[in-house]
Amino acid sequence: MKLTVDLSLLQQAVITMGAEKITYEPTTSLIPTKKIDRDLFDGLEVNFKDIEFDTGLASYKGRQVLLYIKDHSYNNKIYSVLDDGSKGNKYHVADCSKLDEMRRKGRFERYVVTNKLDGIFAVSGNDKHKDILIEGESKLSVCQYCLESINYNKFTSIPRGIVRRTFVQNFELADFFETYSSFFKFMPKGIADSSASYYSNDWKLISNKVRTKFNFQCQQCGLDLNNYKRLLHVHHINAVKSDNSSVNLTPLCCDCHRKQPDHKHIFINHEDTQLISTLRRAQGLNVRKSWLDVYKLADPGMHGVIDVLEKYHLSLPEISYIVKNNKKESEVTLELAWPFKKVAIAIDKPQAIAATKQGWKVYSMRHALSQIDELAQRVR
Ligand SMILES: [Zn+2]
Ligand SMILES: [Zn+2]
Ligand SMILES: [Zn+2]
């Protein structure tokens, strides 16, 4: 898009006022540019069968999405939904028992898929008495069955009732999408770009200085990223992004960085997540003495599974275990693996299939959770 707005008068006014120049954080990169991403951002009506759930999460054309039914005609519900979104159709983020029920009943309604992250969605409904279509926007709630099916943020251990409802009220889609960012080949352009946010004009310079000072090493996991400098971020310790004093800045690898409290919108794709793990392994940093270590080192998308596995008192899994292929095809990385039993949990489907061909039993996140007893039995 070309901007044709003449800003010269505004600039003149700024000079006249003697206003201080402030650093502008570009937000334009949040606007997706590819057609599919633009469509998804606006919401796309699709057939249910075109939505994939391979990993357990909802996806459309390789992008993470959520899905919901826009129509609220039933019982003139649209009016109460416009008033209070929590009364509307829930939006789904994973393959849950509710969706399964619909499948069994053969109810394949049209769903809207989107990756808009503010939770406010277009809704509509026919007023049968007046015979008019009512349209508007409403803040819908996430489906609890979805959160349960993937044990998002230990959801299964949250007591039912008010505590769960509060959790749902505070649920943020951006956090959710970030947790599973490495499950998807394509990240919505806006989301991918926002991870590279910089804070001031001289940030690049400052960042380089800090990283050089610490010899391009992550100060949390110890990873040496001299050969992969782009994977080393600089973190503001006190969370104040304008405080660039040297005591406040520390280099963290992108994985340690995204696991810092209150760090949203650090999206890392699958390749980079695996690369970090592979490098940690090569540098002997993959040491696991407890489930807590497993938790810290593993892909955040695996946390739901790890929380459940921990209760089974199994031996600790290897993280990002590499299966070498004798046919010289590409190597396969399995997110959590018990090599002595050839059992693993993997994110990427083609990699899982490749490992299966070599005699491994590989579970997706979804199947690891739904068949956890069987998995535990195999590992024991
Ligand atoms: Zn659901
Ligand atoms: Zn690190
Ligand atoms: Zn940070």
Image: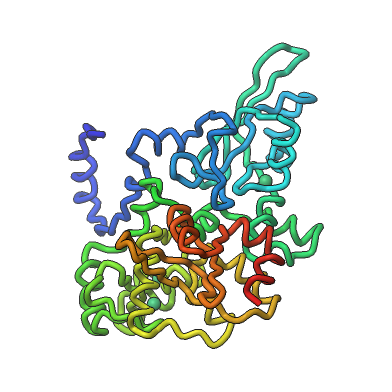
Pick the quarter of the image with the C terminus.
bottom right
Quarter location, residue 341 = bottom right
Quarter location, residue 131 = top right
Task: Give the image location of residue 166, x and y in percent.
Answer: 72, 58
**Label total for image:** 0
Residue drawn at x 54%, y 75% as measured from the top left: 338
Answer left or right for 25 relative to 49.
left
Quarter location, residue 253 = bottom left
Q: Is residue 181 visible?
A: no
Q: Nearer the viewer, residue 9 or 55?
A: 55
Quadrant hosting ligand 2: bottom left
Residue at the extreme bottom of the image, as rendered: 289
Q: Is residue 19 visible?
A: yes
Residue drawn at x 33%, y 52% as measured from the top left: 193
Task: Give the image location of residue 154, x and y in percent.
Answer: 66, 66
Residue drawn at x 78%, y 13% as measured from the top left: 129
> According to the image, what is the colour scheme of the structure?
rainbow
Task: Give the image location of residue 290, x and y in percent.
Answer: 57, 85
Q: Nearer the viewer, residue 55 or 359?
A: 359
Residue drawn at x 40%, y 59% as measured from the top left: 270
Q: Is residue 23 above or below residue 140?
A: below
Q: Is residue 42 above or below residue 14?
A: above
Pick the quarter of the image with the N terminus.
top left
Answer left or right for 308 relative to 339.
right
Task: Give the image location of residue 239, x and y in percent.
Answer: 43, 72
